């Protein structure tokens, strides 16, 4: 540790206070749906260090039994996923399973403190207690002691690490925009049938060349789904691909040494392979091996947050149960099937919600066999590919770049925060890595 660093308790650098949610039961309807963001432990875990969105809100009644925390508050989970942290970018409430830390500006940079928690998260988790669900309390947090440099150096280190986070966030935002473009095109062609409607009304389809427009019919016909473009088929979504469910977690015989391949569960689909990921070196059937670029459909869990479709962007891994590996029967239909599954997300959520127990729901093979969709001719799908495949390739490239930056940041972070690596040396290593 550099001589500039001194061991200090975090409680000497700011104030810890527990979130408030006094009302029981917590799902009282009158508390929710108002203007005040309500952040929960899952939001903190998924935030990547910054909370920029929310899924739940409080009404005035909800706020009255809680507290509105200011921008810049460090949210720290103390139950479930322990010691996950993220900074508020807007005022928000949160429950008593989250602790808020506000830094004394003359002593600490709140961004630096968030990086401290990232760097020392494992050691914080070791302070957890409890036989059923581990947790930590305010006393434990107030007693935490870490090496802390002078304030100006905190700011400089935080500025450097924030450059990584900003670039990673920009790549993710770009990908969200690209995905929205791909999904909008899918919806226009295969849900709203805009080109067919335009031709039926004697108009040229908007933003479409004559050759592409000629691929679409100019009228509709009745089907089990209602009116569909004339000559287009309807078929179960199940018939377009093979759906391979992952193996039971115990079958992988996970090892503490993290040998072999990572086991992919819902958490990994959302956040990638991390410290929470289990590994296995057990020889498993090849059908449970997922490769970079595979389509994965999470069919079980919270209907609003867990049931979704992903493209695996990481290295080969092993597939846990409750996730389908989706293998389109026709190679040229891959992008079509991917966007179809994503377009059906609200439908899947409703199916799961109707079978929901203890906060969980599921989508079954039987559901996929019953769920019919429109299936256009190959010529239309191939034209769709000409427009969408390049978008998917850009998304993939951006994600690979984000992964590289994330790995570099996570390699430099603990050495910077502990004082083992000086900032000029870290900047030089970063320049060499991205050159």
Image (cartoon, rainbow, N blue to C red):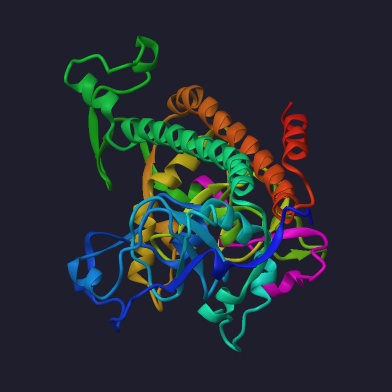
Relative placement, left or right, of 78 versus 229 is right
Relative placement, left or right, of 242 versus 23 is right
> Eyeballing the image, is 69 above or below 417?
below
Which residue: 52% across, 40% down? 169
Which residue: 50% across, 45% down? 240
Instruction: State the residue in front, 145 or 376.
Output: 145
Query: Magenta includes 269?
Result: no
Image position, residue 346 (x, y; %): 34, 53
Which residue: 56% across, 82% down? 133
Residue 347 picture quarter = bottom left
Instruction: State the residue in front, 101 or 125.
Output: 101
Q: From this viewpoint, which residue is outermost toward the bottom?
A: 131
The mark total stands at 0
Query: Magenta includes 254?
Result: yes
Q: Is residue 297 visible?
A: yes
Image position, residue 6 (x, y; %): 70, 61
Residue 221 picture quarter = top left
Image position, residue 363 (x, y; %): 44, 63
Magenta-colored span: 240-266
Identify the image quadrant of the C terminus. top right
Image position, residue 283 (x, y; %): 82, 63
> Eyeballing the image, is 223 above or below 115?
above
> Eyeballing the image, is 30 above or below 171?
below
């Amino acid at each position: 540790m550099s001589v500039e660093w001194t061991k200090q308790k975090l409680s000497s650098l700011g104030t810890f206070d527990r979130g408030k949610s006094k009302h029981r039961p917590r799902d009282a309807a009158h508390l929710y749906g108002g203007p005040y963001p309500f952040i929960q432990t899952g939001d903190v875990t998924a935030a990547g260090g910054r909370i920029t969105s929310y899924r739940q809100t409080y009404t005035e009644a909800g706020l009255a039994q809680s507290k509105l925390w200011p921008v810049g508050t460090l949210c720290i989970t103390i139950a479930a996923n322990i010691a996950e942290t993220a900074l508020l970018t807007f005022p928000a409430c949160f429950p008593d399973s989250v602790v808020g830390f506000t830094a004394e500006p003359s002593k600490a940079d709140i961004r630096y403190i968030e990086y401290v928690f990232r760097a020392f998260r494992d050691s914080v988790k070791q302070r957890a207690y409890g036989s059923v669900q581990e947790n930590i309390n305010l006393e434990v947090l107030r007693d935490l002691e870490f090496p802390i440099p002078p304030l100006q150096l905190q700011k400089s280190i935080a500025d450097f690490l924030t450059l990584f986070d900003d670039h990673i966030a920009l790549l993710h935002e770009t990908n969200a925009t690209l995905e929205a473009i791909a999904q909008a095109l899918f919806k226009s062609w295969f849900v709203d049938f805009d080109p067919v409607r335009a031709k039926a009304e004697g108009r040229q389809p908007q933003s479409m060349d004559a050759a592409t427009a000629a691929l679409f019919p100019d009228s509709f016909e009745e089907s089990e789904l209602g009116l569909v473009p004339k000559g287009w088929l309807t078929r179960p979504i199940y018939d377009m691909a093979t759906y391979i469910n992952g193996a039971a977690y115990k079958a992988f015989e996970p090892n503490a040494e993290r040998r072999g391949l990572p086991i992919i569960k819902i958490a990994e689909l959302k956040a990638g392979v991390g410290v929470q990921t289990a590994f296995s070196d057990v020889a498993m059937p090849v059908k449970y091996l997922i490769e970079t670029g595979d389509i994965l459909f999470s069919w079980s869990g919270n209907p609003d947050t867990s049931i979704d479709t992903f493209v695996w962007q990481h290295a080969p891994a092993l597939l846990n149960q409750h996730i389908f590996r989706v293998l389109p029967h026709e190679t040229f239909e891959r992008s079509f099937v991917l966007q179809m599954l994503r377009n059906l997300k609200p439908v899947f959520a409703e199916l799961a919600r109707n079978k929901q127990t203890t906060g969980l729901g599921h989508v079954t093979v039987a559901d996929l066999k019953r769920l019919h969709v429109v299936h256009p001719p190959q010529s239309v799908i191939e034209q769709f590919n000409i427009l969408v495949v390049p978008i998917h390739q850009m998304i993939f490239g951006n994600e690979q770049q984000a992964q590289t930056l994330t790995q570099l940041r996570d390699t430099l972070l603990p050495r910077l925060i502990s004082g083992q690596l000086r900032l000029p040396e870290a900047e030089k290593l970063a320049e060499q890595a991205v050159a």
